[in-house]
Image (cartoon, grey):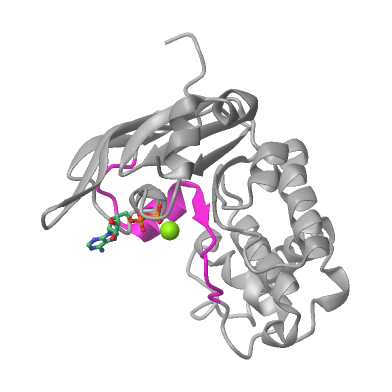
Amino acid sequence: PTTAPAALAVRDVTVRFAGLTALDAVSFTVEPGSVHAVIGPNGAGKSTCFNVLSGVYRATSGTVHLGDTELTGRAPHRIAALGVARTFQNLALPPHATVAESMLLGRHRLTRSGFVSTGLWLPSAAREARRHLQRVREIAEFIGLEKELDHPAGALPYGKQKLVELGRALCMEPQVLLLDEPVAGMTADERRRVAAVVAGVRDSLGISIVLVEHDMGVVMRLADAVTVLDFGRRIAGGTPAEVQNDPAVVRAYLGA
Ligand code: ADP
Ligand code: MG
């Protein structure tokens, strides 16, 4: 093929649980360097979609590709190693770690043997550790956490803890970042800040982002493209302006 592949291509993905079709032949593609929002009412299948993309759930049928690489059926750690990082709807930070330590966890897959087994007394290992710390510092600066690097992550305000999680995901140097409700539970100020950081991740780092988010203001401002799910089906897709005025979307949200 002469055209560049999509960053992420979801084709005809169906997920069935006992007696329930959570996703029904859903397809969409995420263009490189774009923010693609997946929206829909409760129970629409958004989290299921994320869980398929990150390998937590296995699709009953259909495929997922990262560029030319097929992700379908691979384990979560393999998918992460291939370049798809995710954050969680609920915080998943180690309770006592500092911000720097929490973010360093994201670099684990990039080390040859992992930090735990690395002999830090070896000059090469010490160099490698310094290189990772330097990158953690750069990413902390990028997301505005450079002053908090030595603070216990768990003691920071909620909005900043969510940024630490974003930082940890960025430390994996992903090609695609999956963000599950990144501004949920945040103050208006925190929302603006996270939205600006996410836009920066796309615009400055060129990372493709898949965003599940309930805050329509954030979706409309940030997303380049939107996929709308309802009862497991893709009922609309397009630019934010296009889906906003789509009668099927209006009906789904009004429950009519
Ligand atoms: P959303 O995130 O859009 O609110 P979900 O993907 O969480 O929707 O859920 C879609 C449907 O799949 C719901 O009916 C939900 O109850 C069901 N579902 C999700 N995960 C499971 C599971 N592990 N087992 C059985 N049913 C599930
Ligand atoms: Mg959900």
**Does residue 246 lie above or below 186 as drawn?**
above
- 198 relative position to 12: left or right: right
Q: Quadrant of residue 229?
A: top left
Q: Residue at x 73, y 70 (%)?
A: 159
Residue 79 appears in the figure:
yes
Residue 218: image location, x then y, percent: 69, 47
Residue 200: image location, x then y, percent: 77, 44
Q: Residue at x 79, y 49 (%)?
A: 196
Residue 236: image location, x then y, percent: 44, 28
For the C terminus, the image quarter is: top left
Q: Quadrant of residue 137?
A: bottom right
- 13 relative position to 146: left or right: left
Residue most extreme to the bottom = 96
Residue 10 appears in the figure:
no
Q: Residue at x 61, y 51 (%)?
A: 173
- The magenta span reads 71-92
For the N terminus, the image quarter is: top left
